[in-house]
């Protein structure tokens, strides 16, 4: 009986490790964490910066119905705003519609006789305004750089598009890196004919 309890306890601990507090040093030095985006604010007198990492050991295909693919991963975001330093841990699921990738749209435009893909600003805007990626996320842990637990944001963000623009570059880079981990090609280069 005690043996069974210890095995169960060990399994529970093994599955909760990703939500445990880790340090910046662990995020940057352990090979299971891949940095996929970073930013530094250009606002004067503000020290705002951050980086996002995917845990490559958690990347998992959970839906496969071509041209639709769904992949889940655990994402860590290290964020600093002046003296506030926080690491959040989120479960993210990305749904990719490869028939809406940039390369697929360009291919269809060429097939329809469009010759000015790169010169038509509306075509370029349409290419990136709906890149064919949706994402869901749920925050599972939050803590300070010193591993002090912080309150998490309750609730999940459901079915938001991932748009490749200046405000959402981070999510696009995360989504692309997750796709690349599985299929070894960037999502915006996938062509559905």
Image (cartoon, helix red, strand yellow):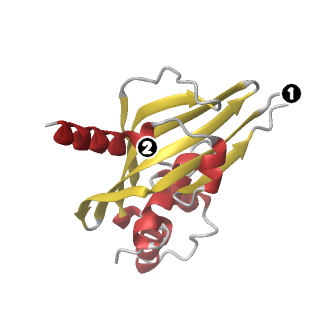
Camera-side mark, 1 or 2: 2
Mark 1: give few (<14), some (14-19) or many (20+) Cα within 10 Å. few
Q: In the shown orientation, is residue 6 left or right of residue 32? A: left
Residue sitting nearer the eye, 189 or 6 = 6
Q: Position of residue 41 (x, y in %)?
A: 76, 38
Q: CA distance from mark 1 to mark 2?
A: 34 Å
Q: Residue furthest front?
A: 2
| SS class, disc 2 | helix
Return the disc, 1 or 2, that comes first in the chain's sequence: 2
- Residue 53 pos. (x, y %): 56, 50
Residue under numbered circle 1: 45
Q: In the figure, 115 relative to 175: above or below? A: below
- Residue occupying image coordinates x 48% and y 38%: 89
Q: Which residue is mark 2?
A: 18
Seen at 34% across and 60% down, the residue is 97
* Element type where label 1 sits in the image: loop
Give the side of residue 187 with respect to residue 23, left or right.
Answer: left
Farthest-out residue, top: 151
């Amino acid at each position: 009986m005690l043996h069974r309890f210890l095995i169960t306890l060990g399994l529970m601990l093994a599955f909760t490790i990703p939500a445990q507090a880790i340090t910046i040093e662990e995020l940057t030095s352990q090979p299971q964490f891949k940095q996929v985006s970073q930013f530094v604010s250009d606002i004067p007198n503000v020290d705002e910066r951050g980086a996002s990492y995917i845990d490559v050991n958690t990347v998992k295909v959970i839906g496969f119905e071509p041209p639709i693919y769904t992949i889940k991963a655990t994402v860590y975001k290290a964020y600093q705003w002046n003296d506030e330093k926080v690491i959040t841990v989120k479960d993210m699921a990305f749904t990719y519609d490869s028939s809406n990738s940039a390369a697929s749209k360009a291919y269809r435009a060429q097939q329809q006789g469009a010759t000015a893909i790169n010169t038509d600003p509306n075509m370029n805007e349409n290419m990136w305004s709906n890149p064919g990626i949706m994402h869901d996320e749920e925050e599972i842990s939050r803590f300070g750089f010193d591993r002090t637990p912080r309150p998490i944001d309750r609730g999940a963000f459901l079915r938001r598009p991932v748009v490749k623009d200046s405000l959402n570059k981070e999510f696009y880079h995360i989504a692309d890196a997750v796709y690349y981990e599985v299929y070894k090609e960037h999502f915006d280069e996938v062509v559905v004919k």
